Image: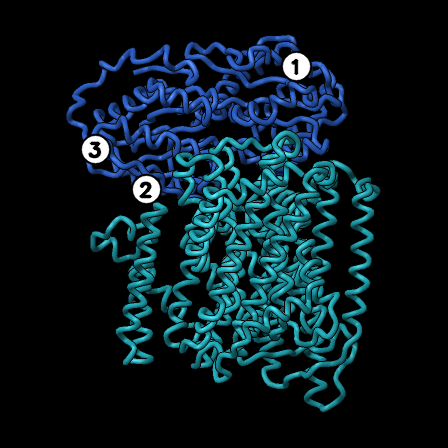
Amino acid sequence: MDLFLSVLITLFAFDHFLFLIAGTLLGLTVGILPGLGGTTALAILLPFVATFEPTNALALMIGVLAPTTTSDTFPAVLIGIPGTAGSQATVLDGYPMAKQGMASRALSAAFLSSLIGGVWGAVILTFAIVFAKPIILAVGFGEQFLLIALALIMVGALTGANVVKGLASCTIGLVIGAIGLAQITADPRLTFGTLYLVEGVPLVVVGMGLFAIPEIVGLLRSKTSIAGDVGLKNQWAQGFRDVANNWFLVFRCSTIGVMVGALPGLGGTVVDWIAYSHMRQTEKNIENVGKGDIRGVIAPESANNAKEGGALIPTILFGIPGSGNKVLLLGGFLLVGIEPGIEMVTTQIDMTYLIIWSLALANVVGASICIFLARPMARITTVPYFILAPILIALIFFASYQVNRDWNNFGGLLVFGLLGVLMKTYGWSRPALLIGFFLSSKIELLSYQTAAVYGYSFLWRTGSLILIGLTIVTLWFLVRQKIGGEQQTTRTDQQRSQIILTLGFLILPIAMIFGVYGLDARASFYPIALSLILAAMLIFVAAGQYVTRRATISKEPLPQNFMVRDMFTQDGNFGPQLREFANLLIFLVLIVVLGFPIATLVFITVFIATRSPRHTLLGLGLAVGLVSIMWTLASMLTLQYPAGWISGVIDMPWWLSGY
Amino acid sequence: MRKRSFLKTAATVVALSLSTAPAMAEVDFSGQTVTVIVPFGEGGGTSRIFGFFGPFLQKYLPGNPLVQMQNVPGGGSIKGANQFHNTQTADGTYLLATSTSTVVNQASRNPLVEYDLSAYQPVALIGSETHWFTSASVSSTPYDFTPLVDRPLMLYALNSPSSADLFHVWVFDKLGIKGAKPIPGLSSSAGYQAFLRGEIQVSSHGTANYLRQVAPELESGAFTDLMSFGLVREDGSVDRMPYSPDTPTFPEQYERIQGKTLEGADLEAYLAINAIWNQASKALFLPTDTPEDIVVAWRLAFEKIAADPEFIAAAAETLGPAELIIGEAAGPIIKSAATLSNATVEQLNAALKANKLTFRIK
């Protein structure tokens, strides 16, 4: 009891509290832009950390990191841009709600669940951390492998209308995930001799391509604002009631968040998808999920703050970072003299509790500020497209560059963007692809490592038996859900283009097989096996689509078997979207010629000026503002933006002449 | 200009040769900004170490320029190093910081590498040491490899055969541990975690983590110390690490197990690997065409830093007992590290082949 009291006193001590709030404010400010967040803010801070008093420095660092998974909800809900991997699932229902004018409701519900999730996570951690070590050490290669298998099956709930199409989407992700260096043999797979593909396209860029670009293209098509003719409804308080009505879901998902964050193997990145799938599988009346159901926002948001707490466990206990930004935090810990290790739960337990509860307190502060901001920020959804769209385009390019400062990401963004538009239009599951992409290399390595260390004996370990049990139950629920249900509507136009697209996807497995054929079996077996499975699935889908098309033409009843029904779901037409997609290509060309910041300036100004001449000055102002932010960041982070062709002709300032 | 020192004891070997600096007055960085390309992300070891040197460089470089790190991560440091190679502003304000993986990429003749570390002007090398240890349940006698040699299987972590971990394959091959088998795809932290779980039997750490994480476990008897790679002196002799004088080095263990001294091609390979892994663990370079007086000014700044009591006190905390090699002495080390001899390449390829790994240095 004395322990808790002394931690509480330090927690709210004036200095500590002040630094915590200062950190939170800094994290929020930086985190408003998609692609930036606590990690960037911490990178800015780290050089100065050593100059503060250790407890204050600690408060500052935790404060800065905490609001990242909160503030990234703004771009995810309001403009459909998942700026971090933790907000990808939030886009699924959050953005449709914004389009229905319910942005403030989605935001207030999201922030309240974030807040509760964060605090509940801290409560669990307070008790769990003391005996977490044996549990974490019990999760070996085999358990990690099964954990990932379980995650993949849970995500099976996200396959969309047709099961086979959904599974094929996931397999496309798995095959794309196999591009890059085969770690076991160090053979490059389908990298075309480039350095960029050795490491592969970053997950955040794939996520933005698949989810944000189709929405931006949609916004350009709509020629209105995000909320369109619906207008903005003020349902701020309704968001709180939604959370209260779903309190049990919040607790379930935040518990999942802590566990997934702490256990090795999966990593925190997919936790929001697991929470989302869990919601889909366990909740009733889910027909509106994916089209703007508040539970689709509550589930991932309750999980992603709790996950940050869970990810602290391996950092504190073993000095092993549990998620990306923990690498920086660990560096900060060392700088202020905190040595991770088992002492952190014995003699240093007060320090551990201080860390855990500082994180929770920073979450509360951050989420409260965001709740307060939800109403004014929701007005973004009423901004007309000709102002919002060019800024969004510049922002996602900026965010994708910022991930690892590689301008090749622009190419990755557009390729996955085009894929995203196609998949969205023709009913292929984008979440399934994204998750397959992320888990692919883990599956390959863990299956190899498990086999090398255990053979099949891993199946008889206690943890494995528990996980196998869970997997079977999940699979049972999944199959029951998929076999039930009825035929949905099938559109009759563009059926032929859809069959062509299905067959077009065959290029991927064929290229992969040719690309890795002849490599050592340890590098080629996995991608070839996956490619063959994918090819079989695609041919099955194409055949199903052909049968359905014949039935449509001859006006016969459509096939009802769950494997072949709903072969042609469609959302909009592809052609007109492709025309709007061209705007992104124009921007890319401008970047190549002018360099990124100047291209931003020109693109935003000209776009706004041509679509609405009376807003030209406003456009110029916004563009200058955005470029000033880039310039400020360049000096704070010592970062250069990719120079264009023009820098070879005119001498450019340092920050505009990147490599 | 040749000096090597242990930071812990650097105060004793200070300022022997400051007079060798010719025409110092001409070099002046006042008002300028020095950019150090760090080909890794923020928060990593390389950023931390050179970030730590930053303020001291600012203090001791003539004209007190602003020193900034520019992180250019990607491709296991190839991207940033290539960028340095293709820019090479040779006025003393543009430098490259490297780590072992930067050297290994060149040494293993990766076709994506455009840079050539042996052509640049080395300013300073910051050494590290590699330590191996096992758990008490595998072997309870310190420094005794016998239980490991007898095991049918002795598993260890291997990030990828093209990474610096490739040297582990050579080490266990040379020690003649028949059951040694690499588990690929494990980063150093994932490998350490697997070791804690008892899934792999031998793990290794660099100096900093050895002192921080492993030393307490050795004390408590949970882990058993095996060996260090060895501290190579300028005359080619190999010493134990001053901070762990009981830990035998690789050449000692080689002799103990194989019954012969390390010599010939084996010794040559050992020295080259030691240069990559330990001596040039972190390094700082100026471009090839940097004028002599600027190179000297930089090296002199490092010598002054190494003698600064404030630095020595702070370095003991941040860097630990790191070996610092400044100036011309670094040249041959970098050359032998970055351009492996054909005999050494053959040794490494043979070790890879013996472990049924298909990666080869071409």
Residue A387 or residue A178, whichever sits in front: A387
Query: Residue at label 2?
Result: B86
**Quadrant location of residue B88?**
top left
Given the image, on which type of amino acid does mark 3 rest? Answer: Phe
Given the image, on which type of amino acid does mark 1 rest? Answer: Tyr
Residue B344 shows in this picture = yes
**Closer to viewer: mark 1 or mark 2:** 1
**Closer to viewer: mark 3 or mark 2:** 3
Q: Secondary structure at mark 2?
A: helix
Of the chain colours in the picture, the one used for chain B is blue
Of the chain colours in the picture, the one used for chain A is cyan
Query: Residue at label 3?
Result: B29
Q: Earlier in the sequence, mark 3 or mark 2?
A: 3
Q: Is residue A146 above or below residue A1?
A: below
Q: Are marks 3 and 2 in contact (CB under 8 Å)?
A: no
- Is circle 3 on the same chain as circle 1? yes
Distance (Cα) linking label 3 and label 2:
23 Å
**Residue most extreme to the bottom:** A555
Query: Residue at label 1?
Result: B143
Residue A331 or residue B283, whichever sits in front: A331
Given the image, on which type of amino acid does mark 2 rest? Answer: Asn
Q: Residue at x 34, y 45 (%)?
A: A638
Distance (Cα) linking label 3 and label 1:
51 Å
Q: Chain of mark 2?
A: B
Distance (Cα) linking label 1 and label 2:
47 Å
